[in-house]
Amino acid sequence: NLGHHFFTPSPPQRTRHADAKAVLELNSETGGVDTMWNFDHVFDQHTSTRELYEDTGVTVVDRAMEGYNGTVFAYGQTSSGKTFTLMGTEEHPGVILCSIYAAFEAIQSASFSNFLVRISYIEIYNEEIKDLLAEDQSPANMSNLKIVEDPKTGPFVKNSVEKVVESAEQIIDLIKFGESNRHYASTNMNEHSSRSHVLFRMIIKRGFTNAGGTGQGSGGVVPPPIGDWENDPQVPVRVCGLNYVDLAGSERLKKTGATGQTLKEANAINTSLLTLGTVISKLATGDKNQHIPYRDSKLTHLLSSSLGGNASTTMIATISPAFDNKEESVNTLRYASRASKIVNDTGVNEIDNLDAFLGQYWGEIQSLKDQLQVSTEEAHGKNAELQDTRDEAERKVGTLRSQAEYLEQQLYDVQAQAAAEKERFLADIDALQSKLDTAQHSMSRQDAEQRQRQDAEREREAGQRRTEIEALRQQLDVEKRGRADEVAQLQQQVQAAAAATASAPAHDGPDESVALLGNKLLQLTRQLKDERETSAREVAMLR
């Protein structure tokens, strides 16, 4: 929720890179960088609460399971997204909800452990402490609440309700109940503005047992403990605390338009935040001899172990990308920059009853040593038998190795013989192929020569026939001309005889000479036709 470039009226679509670690104050006139603040992580308005948790909250939960106290608190002006970052929604769970689920997942996977988880939900309203989980919300009941010190987990509110929980869902229901008792109001800057600081606290008590797997569970539920381990002095116990603080937003009264009760709440909020700023400024100097005014406000008193004490602390500073909130954004960044210089004296919480726990195991350790000695002697007694077995095995291995070498040599000889036979066979095949190629070539040449001779013979015979046909055709042409001449002469004779007969006086019966000529002409015509047909047949036979 820390914007990378936040002084533009319309922030860019995406200004954060995965390794963003600085926020820049840009000059509105030149566009240059006026100030740069460096942090461990920087997120823009597009970052999901889950992504923010993975970068900032996972380590806090992991170290808590190792025995370190952890604190996450959100600081920033009103309406900048502190409560959403920590609480989120059902669709987008915030850092607190993600941490709760992660803690119970770690509890499920822990071995040789029993767990007891207690939570409390405290509100600081107008510098008064209020227990949000208490059924009785009357002022008289709240007057019994006092801040006391716990050497292991830091300051806590005595007489507040501490609910023992067994699942993440149970915690979420309790938070919803606490939220119903929290103070909210509407201002010009935020329709649902928190008017108080709230502290959600989760105490995790871990008992180490010699029964494996007692930490395994399902469905996010803490498994039932084995016996009354919490009060057993023989069971080593480690306690750690996880604190999540949603600070009320700093406000400028002119912008919020606060009046009456809301104005009183704003003054109380600003006063406690001013004290928190003083504490952070003094701690940032690194001077361990100076007085730190933790007790000047109930907020700083409860956060004393988280600021410079025994806790792994993460501060989430939220700012608005609006240009109108420039002054508040710059103040928040200065605040966070000073806080980043604080060095906490973090150490793992000691395990109670550790000596008794270790003493419980000395007898078991000695028994294991005796068992190991007996096992060693039995092992020595079996060495001779083992050696004989090893010698026999080596002898068998030697025999098998010799047999394998003999078989390997035989295999080699067979392979060599097979290779020689293969070479001879391939040579024979090559020789036969060569002979076949030669025979095929010779046969092809002889066939070609024979075809050439046959073609020449057929060409000679064809030429001879053509000559005979041509001679016969010429002879027929001569004979045809001779016959044609004879026919023509006969026709002339017939015509002359016919003419003579026509001019002669009529007499009985035809002229014999004309009849003889007609018969001779007819005979010649038939003879000529027969000769033509005979010539045609002879020509066809020659062809």
Image (cartoon, rainbow, N blue to C red):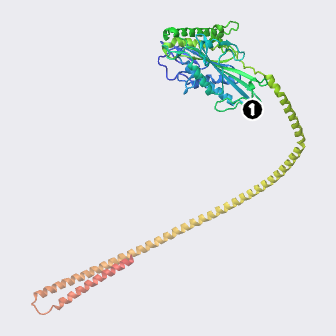
Q: Position of residue 415 (x, y in %)?
A: 73, 56
Q: Position of residue 214 (x, y in %)?
A: 72, 31
**Left or right of residue 445, residue 346 in this image:** right
- Reply above or below: 328 against 510: above
Query: At 72% from the left edge and 15% from the top edge, which residue is drawn?
Result: 151
- Is there any visible trace of residue 338 in the rendered image? no
Circle 1: element type: loop
Residue 304's quadrant in the figure? top right
Name the quarter where the N terminus is drawn. top right
- Is there any visible trace of residue 169 in the rendered image? yes
Most foreground residue, 382 or 508: 382
Residue 289's quadrant in the figure? top right
Q: Position of residue 100 (x, y in %)?
A: 63, 25
**Left or right of residue 458, residue 98 in this image:** right
- Reply above or below: 225 against 287: below
Q: Position of residue 130 (x, y in %)?
A: 61, 14
- Please rate how many residues cluster around mark 1, counting C-alpha atoms within 10 Å: few if below 14, some from 14 to 19, many from 20: few
Most foreground residue, 194 or 334: 194
For disc 1, the marked residue is 212
Most foreground residue, 147 or 81: 147
Residue extending farthest left? 505
Residue extending farthest bottom? 508
Q: How many marks?
A: 1
* Tag 1: amino acid: Gly
**Left or right of residue 519, residue 211 in this image:** right
Name the quarter where the C terminus is drawn. bottom left
